[in-house]
């Protein structure tokens, strides 16, 4: 009895999706990835007291990237001491040229 209800529900959902004429929603990866990297404060000091870290924000823009199997360059913006949020609209060099070169753009705060 339960199996027949399950098959009925599945066929009902599929028939509604086919009748509506719309494609089923399939999620895609975002064109941007924003994350925080925990970076060590002292890269070359291996004493335990130097293991403290700081948060470093980065953003990766995949919008114009040609892909991993192409010879597309990676453009990296090493930001100054201000937050990235205010600068992304001002930094036109990377986005203007990324489209032409099919480049991956990386912004580091």
Image (tube, rainbow, N blue to C red):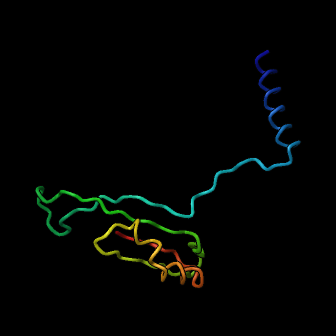
Q: Based on the displayed image, in which of its 4 quarters is residue 102 positioned? A: bottom right
Percent position of residue 51, x then y? 17, 57
Relative to 51, does residue 2 appear above or below in the rendering? above
On screen, residue 77 versus residue 52, left or right, reads right
On screen, residue 42 versus residue 9, left or right, reads left
Percent position of residue 64, x then y? 59, 74
Q: Based on the displayed image, in which of its 4 quarters is residue 12 positioned? A: top right
Relative to 102, does residue 27 appear above or below in the rendering? above
Is the N terminus in the top left, top right, bottom left or bottom right quadrant? top right
On screen, residue 99 versus residue 18, left or right, reads left
Residue situated furthest right in the rendering:
19
Q: Decide which of 10, 81 is in the foreground and name it.
A: 81
Report the residue at 31% width, 75% height from top.
80
Residue situated furthest top in the rendering:
1
On screen, residue 25 versus residue 19, left or right, reads left
Report the residue at 14% width, 63% height from top.
46
Percent position of residue 81, x then y? 28, 72
Report the residue at 85% width, 44% height from top.
20
Relative to 23, does residue 89 appear above or below in the rendering? below
Is the C terminus in the top left, top right, bottom left or bottom right quadrant? bottom left
Count of numbered badges drawn on the protein? 0
Percent position of residue 58, x then y? 39, 65
Q: Decide which of 66, 85 is in the foreground and name it.
A: 85
Q: Decide which of 20, 85 is in the foreground and name it.
A: 85
Report the residue at 47% width, 67% height from top.
60
């Amino acid at each position: 009895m339960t199996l027949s209800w399950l098959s009925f529900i599945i066929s009902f959902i599929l028939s509604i999706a086919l009748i509506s004429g719309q494609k089923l929603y399939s999620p895609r990866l975002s064109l941007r990835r924003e994350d925080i990297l925990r970076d060590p404060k002292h890269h070359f000091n291996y004493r335990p007291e130097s293991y403290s870290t700081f948060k470093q924000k980065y953003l990766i823009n995949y919008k114009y990237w040609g892909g991993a199997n192409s010879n597309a360059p990676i453009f990296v913006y090493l930001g100054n001491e201000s937050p990235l949020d205010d600068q992304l609209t001002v930094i036109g060099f990377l986005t203007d040229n990324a489209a032409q070169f099919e480049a991956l753009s990386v912004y580091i705060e």
